[in-house]
Image (spheres, helix red, strand yellow):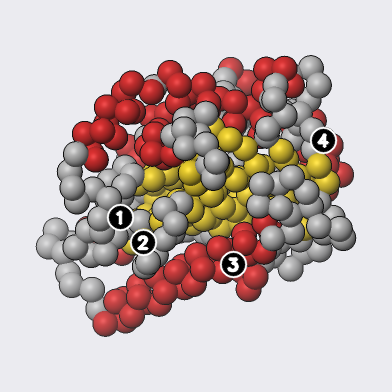
Amino acid sequence: MASLSITSALLLLCCLVIQAHIDSLWDNPPIAKFAQNAEKLGLYYGLNLHEHIRSSSSSTPRPFSREERLAAKTRKTEFEKIGREVEDWAEAMLAESGRDGSFVLPGTNWTKVDCNKALKRVLNPNSKTLQYVKWLPDSRGTHADASSKLHPCMKVYAEIDAPFDLVCRYLSQEQRYKEYNSLLIDQKDVEELTPSSKICWSQTKKLLFIQPRDFVTYCAHKWRKDGSEVILNQACNHPTFQTSELRAFGLRGATFLSRHPEQPDKTSIILLSHCNCGNDIPEWAVRTAVGVLAPIKPFEIIHRINIGVKKAENEVKALEDTAQKNKKYLKPREDGRSRRPAGMAQMGYACFWPKGGGLMEEE
C-alpha cells in the first residue's frame, strides 16, 4: 500500500512538471520558478557564498579566517583582471571596423546583417542601425572552453534619439528592461563583488527551437574620462547555480554609450556580444537560428529603447534634473567612484547599478 502511494505521488509529480512546462514557458518558466522557490526557501540564492557559510553555521557570525579573506581577495583580483581583459578584447573587436560602423576592415570576416525587409520600415526606417556578425571560438582567454566550436559574435552601431544623460538613466532602471529587451524574462543579482561589478543571473524565453536558457554572468561598468559609459561582461560560474543542460553563455560582451559627436540631443550606442547558445546545440542549428533572429532582434532592441526613452522622458528627465541640482552629482564620491546610475539589459544578461559606484578614469 505504501509502495502504491509513493508510485502515485511520483506519477502526480511528473504530471505536474510536464503540465507546467507545457502551460507557460513564457510566464512561468521552469528555471525561473526554481529560482523563486530557492529564494523563498533560503537556499542562499542571490547571497554571497561566504555570507551563507557565516549565517548558516551558527546564530553568532564568526569572523572570516585568514584563508577565507585571502581567497576572497584573490577572487576579487581575478575578476578585476577579467574586466580589463574584456575591455581590451572589445576594443580590438571594434578596431576591425570604423568607429561608427560604416565599414569593416578587409580580412576581418565580419558579415553585414541587414534588418528583415518586412520589418525594416518599423525597426530601422532610416538605416541608421548597422549590424555585423562573425563566428569565433570561445573568446574568454584562459577561461575559454577548449572546444573548437564557433559561436556568433555580434556588434551593433546605432543612435538613440534622446540626450545621453536621459538614456543612461533610463537604461539604469531595472524595472524598464522588459520594455526594450524581449529576449529576457527574468534576472537577479547573485553577488556583488565591488561597487562597480557583480555576478548576475538571467533567463531568456524560448527562441524558435532553442529552449529557455539561463545565464550566469560577471558584469562591470566604468565611466571614461571623455564622459562615456562602458559596461563589460563575461560568462562565469557561481556556486548558487550549478551548470545545467539549459545553460547558455554570454561569453564576452560590452556596451558603449556616449554623447553623439555631432548632435547633442542624441546618444551613440554600440552593442558587442559573443554568445554560446548552449553546448547541447550543434553549430549548424545555431547558424540557422542566427540567420532568422539576427535580422530582427538587435534592431528591435534599439527600436524599443527609442520608444521607451520617449515614453518615459518626463519621468526620467525629472529624476536627472533633480540629481544634477546636487553640485556633487557629477563629481567623484569620497571613494573616487561615480554617483551616476548605470546599467543595461543586453543579449543574455541584465545588470543595474541604480546608486552608481562605477570606476572613473582620471582626467
| Amino acid at dot 2 | Met
Q: Secondary structure at mark 2?
A: strand
**Along the polypeptide, which appears first: circle 1 or circle 2?**
1
Marks 3/1: CA–CA distance: 22 Å
Marks 1/2: CA–CA distance: 6 Å
* Image coords of residue 264 (percent x, y): 47, 37
| Amino acid at dot 4 | Gly
| Amino acid at dot 1 | Ser
Residue under circle 2? 360
The image quadrant that residue 115 belongs to is top right
Question: Total marks drawn?
Answer: 4
Q: Secondary structure at mark 1?
A: loop
Residue under circle 1? 338
**Along the polypeptide, which appears first: circle 3 or circle 4?**
3
Residue 291 bears which disc, if any?
4
* Image coords of residue 278 (percent x, y): 69, 47
* Image coords of residue 40 (percent x, y): 32, 37
**Along the polypeptide, which appears first: circle 4 or circle 1?**
4
Q: Are marks 3 and 4 in contact (CB under 8 Å)?
A: no
Residue under circle 3? 88
Q: Are marks 1 and 2 in contact (CB under 8 Å)?
A: yes
Q: Which is nearer the eye, 137 or 311?
A: 311
| Amino acid at dot 3 | Asp
